Image (cartoon, helix red, strand yellow):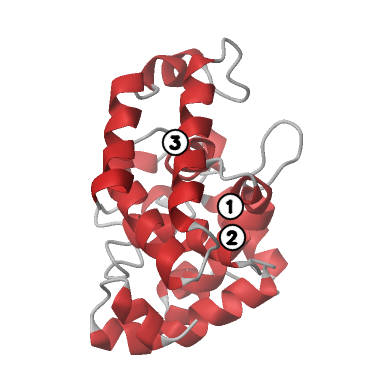
C-alpha cells in the first residue's frame, strides 16, 4: 500500500511515509492479498494502533506477571513481553512462536517487535497464523466472508471500539477499491446480526457471549452506511 492511501485513511504524513513499506511487505508475506482482506486488516490495525501512533501498549506489562497462559513463567516476563506490534502480541510464549516464524531471537530483544518492520509483520502473522477459530479458519478467511464481528472478537478478545473499527472498515473499503462498498457494508451488518441471533456462537465463552453487542448497537452501525 502507498503512503497516499494511508493519508487518505487519516494517518498523518510522517507515519504514512514511515509505515507504508512495512505494511505492504507484511501483507505480501502473509497473503493479505485482496482488497477485501486488506480492508478488514487495515481497519483493525488502524483502531488497535491509534492510527499507527502506537507500536506497543502504553502500560508497563506488570499486569501480565505470572500469567502462565501467556507463558510468563520467569520474573519480569510480564514487562519484558508486554504487547507490541500493530496488533499487539503478548507473552513469552507468543514472542517465541513469532520469533521462530521469522527466524529472529526475540527472547533477548523483544523490543524489536515495536520497530516498523516487525510491528507490521507481527500483525500479519497474528492475522494469518496465530489467530484461528476451532475449525482452523484464520482472519483472512473470515475477511473473505465479511465476518467483521468475529474478526473483532479474535483481535480484541471482545468488542471494544466497535463503531470506530466499523468506520475504519467503511473508509478502507473505499480506499482499497472493494467492489460495491455500500452493499458490502450491508453484508457486514447482516452477518453481525446473524451472529448475534445465532444460539451457538462458536469459539466464544460465556463471558463474551454476554458481551456481544446488541441488535440495536449493530443497527446503529448500519446508519453510518446510509448516512455516511
Q: Are marks 1 and 2 in contact (CB under 8 Å)?
A: no
Q: Mark 1 or mark 3, which is nearer to you? A: 3
Mark 1 near mark 3, Cβ–Cβ under 8 Å?
no
Q: 65 or 103: which is nearer to us? A: 103
Which label sits on residue 94?
1
In the rendered structure, find residue 189 and report the number of the disc placed on it.
Answer: 3
Q: Where residue 159 appears, x then y in whole percent?
A: 37, 34
Q: Residue at x 35, y 49 (%)?
A: 165
Q: Nearer the viewer, residue 205 or 162?
A: 162
Q: Mark 2 highlights which residue?
A: 37
**In the image, residue 57 above or below residue 153:** below
**Dot 3: what SS?**
helix
Residue 19 position, x and y percent, is: 41, 82
- Judged left or right of residue 139, residue 220 is left
Q: Is residue 212 visible?
A: yes
| N-terminal label among 1 and 2 | 2
Ranked by sequence position, the earlier of labels 2 and 3 is: 2
Q: Along the polypeptide, which appears first: circle 1 or circle 3?
A: 1
Q: Residues within 10 Å of mark 1 (few under 14, many from 20)?
A: some
Amino acid at each position: 500500500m502507498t503512503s497516499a492511501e494511508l493519508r487518505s485513511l487519516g494517518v498523518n504524513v510522517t507515519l504514512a511515509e514511515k509505515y507504508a513499506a512495512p505494511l505492504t511487505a507484511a501483507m505480501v508475506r502473509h497473503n493479505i492479498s485482496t482488497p477485501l482482506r486488506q480492508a478488514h486488516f487495515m481497519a483493525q490495525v488502524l483502531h488497535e494502533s491509534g492510527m499507527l501512533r502506537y507500536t506497543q501498549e502504553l502500560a508497563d506489562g506488570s499486569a501480565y506477571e505470572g500469567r502462565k497462559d501467556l507463558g510468563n513463567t520467569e520474573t519480569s516476563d510480564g514487562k519484558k513481553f508486554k504487547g507490541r506490534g500493530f496488533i499487539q502480541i503478548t507473552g513469552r510464549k507468543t514472542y517465541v512462536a513469532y520469533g521462530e516464524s521469522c527466524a529472529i531471537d526475540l527472547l533477548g530483544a523483544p523490543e524489536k517487535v515495536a520497530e516498523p518492520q516487525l510491528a507490521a509483520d507481527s500483525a500479519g502473522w497474528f492475522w494469518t497464523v496465530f489467530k484461528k477459530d476451532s475449525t482452523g479458519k484464520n482472519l483472512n478467511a473470515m475477511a473473505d466472508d465479511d465476518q467483521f464481528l468475529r474478526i473483532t472478537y479474535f483481535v480484541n478478545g471482545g468488542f471494544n471500539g466497535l463503531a470506530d473499527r466499523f468506520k475504519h472498515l467503511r473508509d478502507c473499503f473505499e480506499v482499497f477499491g472493494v467492489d460495491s462498498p455500500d452493499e458490502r457494508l450491508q453484508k457486514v451488518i447482516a452477518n453481525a446480526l446473524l451472529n448475534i441471533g445465532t444460539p451457538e456462537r462458536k469459539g466464544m465463552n460465556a463471558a463474551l457471549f454476554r458481551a456481544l453487542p446488541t441488535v440495536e448497537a449493530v443497527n446503529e452501525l448500519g446508519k453510518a452506511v446510509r448516512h455516511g
